[in-house]
Image: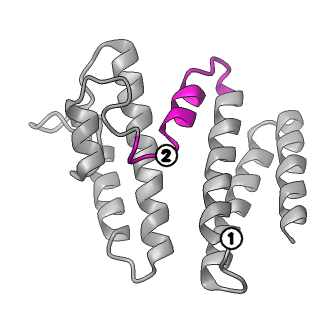
């Protein structure tokens, strides 16, 4: 796809509109989930940009504090170490060389975030939304690779059972 005059890709513009719409959701959990998802993707983009020696500014989604820090900071943690408690975990995940293992760790990190943010939500819409996101993760792994997918599928289903 071709870049716009500002150096943005159409899919980045669409993603920005998607996340901007999610920021307006009436449910706090929905807003927090999409902000977390956007921030994870932005951090991964910034880490990859740093690794390959290019500026991430035109590839970051949103104009919030996190995106601004990722675009401008030269420090190891982008100056976000205290704001994003999961930043070190994500940096270690980013350093994983096996792409399948990296995806598995990333999904487990997201799973843990969902657990943490719905722990005290018993029989609520937040719990149901988290369950839908978890089922999407499980379904994706089942489709990735038959053998590896089954293993991760069983692992994630076991986590669901333990929650119940």
- State the residue position of label 2: 85
- Quadrant of the rendered image containing residue 115: bottom right
| Location of residue 29 in the rendering, given as x and y in whole percent from the top left corner | 50, 73
When the figure is inspected, residue 42 is found, relative to residue 138, above or below; the finding is above
From which residue to which does the magenta span run? 82-100
Q: Is 28 placed left or right of 160 in the picture?
A: left
Tag 1 near tag 2, CB within 8 Å: no
Please tell me which residue is depicted at 89% across the width and 35% down the height of the picture: 147
Real-space Cα distance between discs 1 and 2? Answer: 18 Å
- Which residue occupies the foreground of this view, 125 or 14? 125
> Quadrant location of the N terminus?
top left
Q: Is 2 placed left or right of 129 in the picture?
A: left
Q: Is residue 84 magenta?
A: yes
Mark 1: which secondary structure? loop
When the figure is inspected, residue 50 is found, relative to residue 101, above or below; the finding is above
- State the residue position of label 1: 119
């Amino acid at each position: 796809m071709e870049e716009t005059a500002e150096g943005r890709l159409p899919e980045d513009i669409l993603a920005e509109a998607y996340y901007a719409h999610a920021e307006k959701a009436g449910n706090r959990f929905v807003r927090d989930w999409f902000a977390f998802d956007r921030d994870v993707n932005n951090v991964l983009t910034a880490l990859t940009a740093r690794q390959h020696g290019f500026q991430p500014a035109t590839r970051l989604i949103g104009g919030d504090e996190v995106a601004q820090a990722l675009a401008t900071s030269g420090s190891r943690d982008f100056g976000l170490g205290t704001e994003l408690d999961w930043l070190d975990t994500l940096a270690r995940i980013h350093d994983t060389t096996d792409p399948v293992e990296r995806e598995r760790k990333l999904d487990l990190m997201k799973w843990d975030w969902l657990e943490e943010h719905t722990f005290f939500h018993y029989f609520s819409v937040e719990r149901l939304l988290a369950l839908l996101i978890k089922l999407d993760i499980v379904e994706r792994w089942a489709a990735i690779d038959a053998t590896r997918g089954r293993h991760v599928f069983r692992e994630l289903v076991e986590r669901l059972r333990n929650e119940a």
